[in-house]
Amino acid sequence: IRPKIAKRDVTLHILKTFGIQMSKKLGQNFLVDEQVVDGIVAAAAVKPGEAVLEIGPGIGTLTQGLAEAGANVTAVELDRQLLDVLAKTLAGYDNVRIIHGDILRIDISREIRAEKFKVIANLPYYITTPIIMRLLEERLPVELMVTMVQKEVAERMVAAPGSKDYGALSVAVQFYTQPEIMFVVPPQAFIPAPAVESAVIRCRVRSAPPVSVTDEKAFFRVVKAAFAQRRKTLANALKGGGIAQEVVDAMLRQTGIDGGRRGETLTLAEFAALANAWTSRQ
Ligand code: SAM
């Protein structure tokens, strides 16, 4: 039986043995709570032989949990100094492959050839949104994402129209997935303890969007414009987003949506209606 890495004393011992200076810039906060690792593995319902992409394995804490569950893990780590550590802490798990690289740059479909895979990660918080957006927009064969993010970001991902947390991230995540906050994780579950609370969020990727959209690019342009200037009315925000006044007026007329509303009150269906009206006039 191998010692669990997800323990304070084991983690401190590994960091000391390898002389690791943890990098704040790279969002390094390592998990030291076994229950949280188990909770993530359970939330993802990892089954033996399943392909899993892990982002930022660190010293291998969550990777170990995934490997023990029998997953076929491909883990991408940017910090070169952790490669030697991972080779040691995960030695003997032949179902783990570590790749040195930047998750925002590597060719993911070349690294994971599986027909479908799950993304499971304790994300580096400084690039949470770009990572999630890349995974969703590239239409990779991801079936499920179970990720640790800042609690405040998790709340934005699940936010409903009209709430203060509702924004372009909520619309994008809900367009592509069904997000669900699984549990909240306190700062003490990490070394070093981050300044904020965290949450594990599970996003089931949809096989088709929940609303019908003629042109996805147009849909996201409308969404971005609507949220770019939150204090403006919808009509003014759309005009500010580069859509001509007469086109905006026609879009609003055609959909029956009141241009005096704020963008943040619109549902996905209303954004889709506006975008489809716009596309139909181009
Ligand atoms: N999985 C470990 C755990 O749960 O304890 C570490 C998680 S830590 C929050 C985030 C990890 O992502 C760090 O190991 C960091 O070096 C790595 N990382 C940061 N930026 C990255 C990037 N662009 N691509 C891949 N890994 C990155």
Image (cartoon, grey):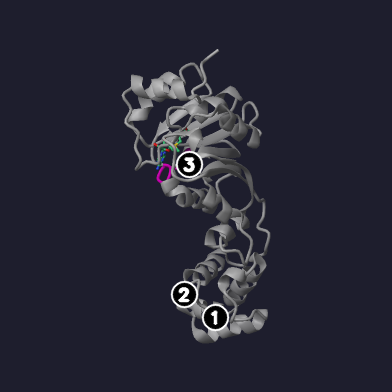
Tell me the kind of residue under disc 3: Leu
Left or right: residue 62 versus residue 180 is left
Relative height, residue 61 to residue 137 (above, below)? above
At mark 3, the secondary structure is loop
Q: Which mark is residue 123?
A: 3
**Res 1 visible:** yes
Near mark 3 (Cα within 10 A), the count class, few <14, some 14-19 or many ≥20, is many
Quick one: label 1 or label 3, which is nearer the N terminus? 3
Residue 109 falls within the magenta-colored stretch: yes
Where is the N terminus found, in terms of image quarters? top right
Q: Residue at x 53, y 54 (%)?
A: 137
Percent of width and height locating residue 187 = 49, 39
Cβ atoms at labels 1 and 3 below 8 Å apart? no
Magenta residues, dominant SS class = loop
**Foreground: 275 or 86?**
86
Q: Residue at x 44, y 44 (%)?
A: 195
**Res 112 visible:** no
Where is the C terminus found, in terms of image quarters? bottom right
Boundaries of the magenta span: 103-110
Q: Which mark is residue 85?
A: none
Relative height, residue 105 to residue 260 (above, below)? above
At mark 2, the secondary structure is loop
Q: Residue at x 58, y 60 (%)?
A: 171
Q: Which residue is mark 2?
A: 241
At mark 1, the secondary structure is helix
Percent of width and height locating residue 75 = 47, 33
Q: Which residue is mark 1?
A: 235
Cβ atoms at labels 2 and 3 below 8 Å apart? no
Percent of width and height locating residue 37 = 56, 31
Q: Residue reaching furthest top? A: 1
Residue 263 falls within the magenta-colored stretch: no
Ligand 1 resides in the quarter of the picture at: top left
